[in-house]
Amino acid sequence: MVNFAHTFSLTVYYFKGIGKAIYKKVRSGYVAWIEEIPGVNTQGASKKEVRENLSDALSEFLLARRDFTKRERSRGASFVRERFVAV
């Protein structure tokens, strides 16, 4: 039986006001993800590297979503795009 308390640890940080970045220490380094955005995850050898990779993953995710919106608009989809502010 593996004692998971000794094999990894979780660290939680707020990530640019978007949500929480979760960092998990694993044998090969770190894995990380944005808790509130499924699919934004990465890995790295060090915490610094995984933080940079997570920033890149989030940027790529947001760019892909913007490209999707542009494609939908070009197909004639009707929608309103505005800045969201939580209440």
Image: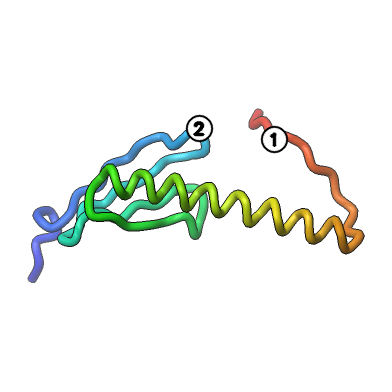
Instruction: Indicate which disc, 1 or 2, sits on the residue closer to the N terminus.
Output: 2
Task: Give the residue at mark 1.
Answer: 84
Closest to the observer: 59 or 5? 59
* In-image side of 59 versus 20 (left or right): right
Three-letter amino acid code at disc 1? Phe
Indicate the quadrant where residue 61 lies: bottom right
Marks 1 and 2 close (CB-CB < 8 Å): no
Task: Give the residue at mark 2.
Answer: 17
**Which SS class for mark 2?**
loop
Indicate the quadrant where residue 69 lies: bottom right
* Up-down relation of residue 15 to residue 45 (above or below): above
* In-image side of 63 versus 24 (left or right): right
Quadrant in the picture for the N terminus? bottom left
Query: For mark 1, does the 10 Å Cα neighbourhood hold few (<14), some (14 to 19), or many (20 or more) residues?
Result: few
Residue beneath the point at 21% across and 55% down:
29
Residue beneath the point at 28% across and 55% down:
44
Give percent across and percent down for residue 55.
44, 45
- In this view, the residue farthest toward the bottom is 1
Give percent across and percent down for residue 81.
79, 42
* In-image side of 77 versus 43 (left or right): right
* Up-down relation of residue 57 to residue 18 (above or below): below
